[in-house]
Amino acid sequence: MPYLEIDRYRSYYAGDLSKGGTPIVFCHGSGGGHHHWIYQLKKLPETINPIAVDLPGHGRSEGSPENNIGNYRDWLHKFSKAAGLEKFVVAGHSMGGAIAMAYALKYPEQTIGLILVGSGAKLRVLPAFLEELRQGSVPTDLPDYLYSSGSADELIKRGREEVENTDPSIYLADLSACDHFDIREELPKIKQPAQVICGDEDRLTPVKYSQYLKDNLSRGRLEVIEGAGHMVMLEKPEEVNQAIAKFIEEAF
């Protein structure tokens, strides 16, 4: 299995660093892992080289989760150095989108573009969610916010099982990082082309969040996908991949 050593910890990634094509590094959202990008890893065109990471303390990566987006951003920079990636597109879902935007602001020379899925310039978290996590339990209704009303029962079931089997401390760290994230004033400083994608039934990062990104990024474009919720890349993988492929073809 592919691991890199970062800060003395083994860090997992999925993909082939030796493959040609435009490299895209995918960052998952709160409590997630590289498997949230399974359809991008397997189904994007050969002209694209997808790499999906497990952030510290997530999935198969060692270390501890962070409660600060900047720490995840700087970990990703260390990952890129260890992986030999000089310039690449940074993609992220939800919290991963926050990491991607923070990366573009601090490391613009490496960032050739952004793909922001179900994300926002400010990621406020329901106070009740954070309080329940501080008490050591995952909010029972959190899975209800992840998928659209029309998603397959099996997909919703797997999502609920994943949430219930994730250590609450991971969600607490990640959602605390999201709750403190706000780069609304800095968005216009991001000059790279950016593809924004969201589901029209997203309850955690509603369409207005993505519309704000599109309107305030220097080179933003927006794709709203019908019949999808917050986990749009799992609910509507073909539509997401089409949007990504079109963006890469037209922007690069």
Image (spheres, grey):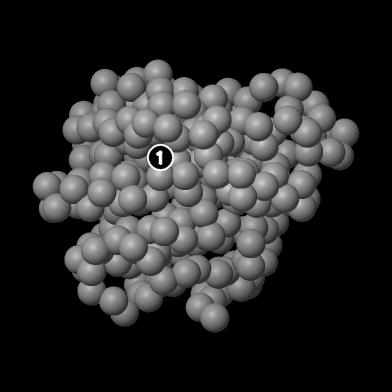
Q: Which residue is drawn at 23% across and 74% down?
A: 20
Please name the residue that numbered disc 1 is placed on: 117
Which of the 4 image quarters holds residue 185?
Answer: top left
Quarter of the image with the N terminus is bottom right
Q: Can residue 74 be seen in this view?
A: no
Label 1 amino acid?
Val
Look at the picture and state if 242 lies above or below 225.
Answer: below
Look at the picture and state if 89 lies above or below 46.
Answer: above
Q: In this view, does 83 lie to the left or right of 139?
A: left
Q: Residue at x 20, y 66 (%)?
A: 47
Circle 1 packing at 10 Å, graded few (<14), some (14-19), many (20+), is many
Horizontal and vertical percent for residue 157? 67, 47
Look at the picture and state if 60 lies above or below 108.
Answer: below
Horizontal and vertical percent for residue 213? 33, 26
Task: Tell me how many marks there are.
Answer: 1
Horizontal and vertical percent for residue 19? 28, 76
Looking at the picture, tell me which residue is in the foreground, 242 or 122.
242
Looking at the picture, tell me which residue is in the foreground, 193 or 111.
193
